[in-house]
Image (tube, rainbow, N blue to C red):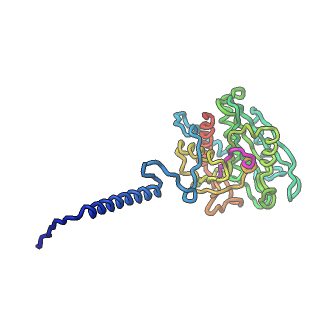
Amino acid sequence: MKQPTTTKVCLPRATLCSLWLEIFLMLLLTFALASTIACAKGISSAGATVATPKSEFPAASPVPPESAAPDNAPLPHIDSKRAFQYTREVTAFGPRYMGSENHKKLERYILDHLKSDQVEDDTFTADTVEGKFPVRNIIAKFPGVKDGIIVILGHYDTNYPLRDTGYVGANDGGSSTAILLEYANQLRGGGAEKKRDGYSIWLVWTDGEEAVKTWSATDSLYGSRHLAEKWEKDGTLQKIKALMVMDMIGDADLDIIRATNGAPWLLDLIYTAAERGGYQSHFYALQGSIEDDHVPFVKRGVPSADVIDLDYGYNNVFHHTPQDTMDKLSPKSLEIVADTILETIHILDQR
């Protein structure tokens, strides 16, 4: 094999200086390019995080630091069998649209469960495209030692246009009515005279959530729109720390959507609570803006969240159909949602 030949070359001093200058400039340029590439990846050459343009990634939802603090308190648990039985009894009334006899029977059923509680009514007459209807929001108040209110809403009416189809609304109206009844059981556990160690909790069975003809800004949410306006006038809205709506939460194949028109920090807090219970797989696989009872409060600046499974059957096939029946529901789903929201309340109480 031929050996390489080595030759000693002597360069003039001026040429040697030029060569060293070129090498220095090349090294400097290489370093500058490396720094530029590092910054483009989100890390600067000094190791500090560089802000990513909003056009590339959505900003993370801010969560109050204190909300996610470690907590060793026992996780809350509802009586899921009892909650499921409530759902069955509510559904057994049949169609419960505004103004119907079954609707009045359900009102009495709810009030019978709240005999030992502090209860208020928000009643009025709704002027709709199908005529005038009596509307009744039922409010059960559980006082707390902290200054402020956490509100949990759930509607108890069924769909008026489906009144003659055999539609009984087991999930849509039944599950939300029932879960609030079970919350009342949990909240009165310390006795009627004893204040809870936290914020006051108000449970609201909203009426007239459903449209009487076609869903629109004026034909829907009759009860919550009236209540939000009333609370705005009397100053109640300013005292609300968080408002959460329960709707369609009994689906056996539970998948709570992230309703993006709610308060991001509250949505994140609910997810934190779900993680603590090991239920996070049932939350936020889907997301989107939802029109529900939280909307009138969102419009008035109340931190709100809609807790809803709007993926009820394949392609939501059971929603607003006579197929919305008890066999599609599960006590486990009621337990998952109810326990998660009770843990959310616990976290809020610590703030």
Number of numbered discs: 0
- For this rendering, which residue is in front, 133 or 48? 48
The quadrant in which the N terminus is found is bottom left
Q: Quadrant of residue 130?
A: bottom right
Horizontally, is 71 left or right of 160 in the view?
left
Find the residue positioned furthest to the bottom.
Answer: 2
Residue 138: image x %, image y %?
Answer: 78, 41
Horizontally, is 298 left or right of 64 in the view?
right
Indicate yes or no whether the magenta region holds residue 306: yes
Indicate yes or no whether the magenta region holds residue 270: no
- Residue depicted at x 62% and y 60%: 313
Residue 264: image x %, image y %?
Answer: 62, 48
Q: Quadrant of residue 57?
A: bottom right
Q: Quadrant of residue 30?
A: bottom left
- Residue depicted at x 61% and y 56%: 287
Residue 119 makes an appearance in the image: yes
- Residue depicted at x 39% and y 60%: 29
Horizontally, is 130 left or right of 192 in the view?
right
Relative height, residue 166 to residue 177 (above, below): below
Residue 265: image x %, image y %?
Answer: 61, 45
- Residue depicted at x 33% and y 62%: 22
Q: Which residues make up the magenta segment?
A: 298-308
